[in-house]
Amino acid sequence: MRWRQCRHTGKLIPVDEAAKKYAGHYIQGDIETFVSPVDGSVISDRKQLEDHNRRNNVVNAAEFSPEYYASKAKERARFYEGEHTRRESHARKSEIYEIIMRAERNAN
């Protein structure tokens, strides 16, 4: 039996099973128009969304795997329980400060 690595999970899966999952091409539908919570711009298609994300240095939450969310939850729990280093604490404070300053710049 032949195997290949799944690009999403990194696990090895049989080629026959992989072929069933990705049997062919498909056309992806357009997105519904919405107002960005980041900068208030109106996003009506995928190209605008891609440009918006690049311009504001953000990503869609749908792009993250459940494993990513689980690892971040463990990291937060460790931080809140006081099991972090001084360096991690300083880095987190700096990150929060930068986010607040970016939000204030966008609000003006």
Image (tube, rainbow, N blue to C red):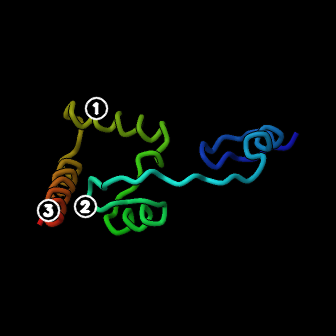
Q: Mark 2 or mark 3, which has the lower sequence index?
A: 2
Q: Position of residue 70 (x, y in %)?
A: 42, 34
Residue depicted at x 35% and y 33%:
74
Q: What whole-number distance in Å separates the C-alpha atoms at marks 2 and 3?
A: 8 Å
Residue depicted at x 49% and y 42%:
65
Between 66 and 5, the one nearer to me in the picture: 66
Badge 1: how crowded within 10 Å, few (<14), some, or many (20+)?
few
Q: Are marks 2 and 3 in contact (CB under 8 Å)?
A: no
Q: Quadrant of residue 9?
A: top right
* Quadrant where the N terminus is found in the figure: top right
Badge 3: how crowded within 10 Å, few (<14), some, or many (20+)?
few
Q: Position of residue 89 (x, y in %)?
A: 18, 48
Q: What whole-number distance in Å separates the C-alpha atoms at marks 1 and 3?
A: 32 Å
- Which disc is residue 107 wearing? 3
- 82 vs 35, left or right, is left
Please, which residue is most extreme toward the right here? 1
Residue depicted at x 60% and y 46%:
8
Q: Quadrant of residue 95?
A: bottom left
Badge 2: how crowded within 10 Å, few (<14), some, or many (20+)?
few
Q: Position of residue 12 (x, y in %)?
A: 71, 41
Label 1: state its secondary structure: helix
Between 86 and 34, the one nearer to me in the picture: 34
As shown in the figure, which amino acid type bears the numbered disc 1?
Ala
Q: Which residue is mark 1?
A: 77
Q: Which residue is mark 2?
A: 39
Depicted 108 relative to depicted 61: above or below: below
As shown in the figure, which amino acid type bears the numbered disc 2?
Asp
Depicted 94 relative to depicted 83: above or below: below
- 14 vs 8, left or right, is right
Q: Are marks 1 and 3 in contact (CB under 8 Å)?
A: no
As shown in the figure, which amino acid type bears the numbered disc 3?
Ala
